[in-house]
Amino acid sequence: MKKMIQTTLLTAFVVLVTASFSYAEFSVTGNSNFPFFHLGCLVVGGLIIISLKRKYSKLYLSEAIGSFALYTLMVSIFTAPVVDALKNLIN
């Protein structure tokens, strides 16, 4: 029962983070330049982390959530608006 609850919590976290990433990117870039590849990478990465959590019972919930949060941060760094902001910050 505990494993199922933890997997459900992890799934909810993955869905909420992916949805917030999609909303943020859509509000910044608009409909024409939406990064579908980055969204796909987030979905596939979330599915992999969820499947690892289901397969390995010794993987803590905090480790899975932390790894997906860091993965989301890494994916979001390489989107066009963030790269443009970093270019403007450096110049």
Image (cartoon, rainbow, N blue to C red):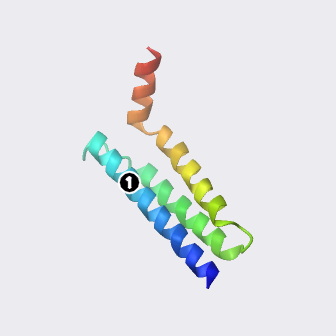
Is 63 left, or right, of 72 in this rendering?
A: right
Residue 50 vs 83, above or below: the answer is below
| On-image quarter of the C terminus | top left
Nearer the observer, 33 or 20: 20
Residue at point 32% right, 51% down?
23
Residue at point 44% right, 20% down?
89
Q: Secondary structure at mark 1?
A: helix
- Quarter of the image for residue 79 reads top left
Residue 85 vs 68, above or below: the answer is above
Q: Farthest residue toward the left?
A: 31
Is 47 left, or right, of 31 in this rendering?
A: right
Q: Farthest residue toward the bottom?
A: 1
Where residue 33 sits: x, y (%)?
A: 30, 42
Is 28 left, or right, of 38 in this rendering?
A: left
- Which residue does the numbered mark 1 point to in the structure image? 20
Residue 89 vs 10, above or below: the answer is above
Where residue 62 sits: x, y (%)?
A: 63, 61
Residue at point 52% right, 45% down?
73
Where residue 47 sits: x, y (%)?
A: 54, 66
Kind of residue at disc 1: Ser
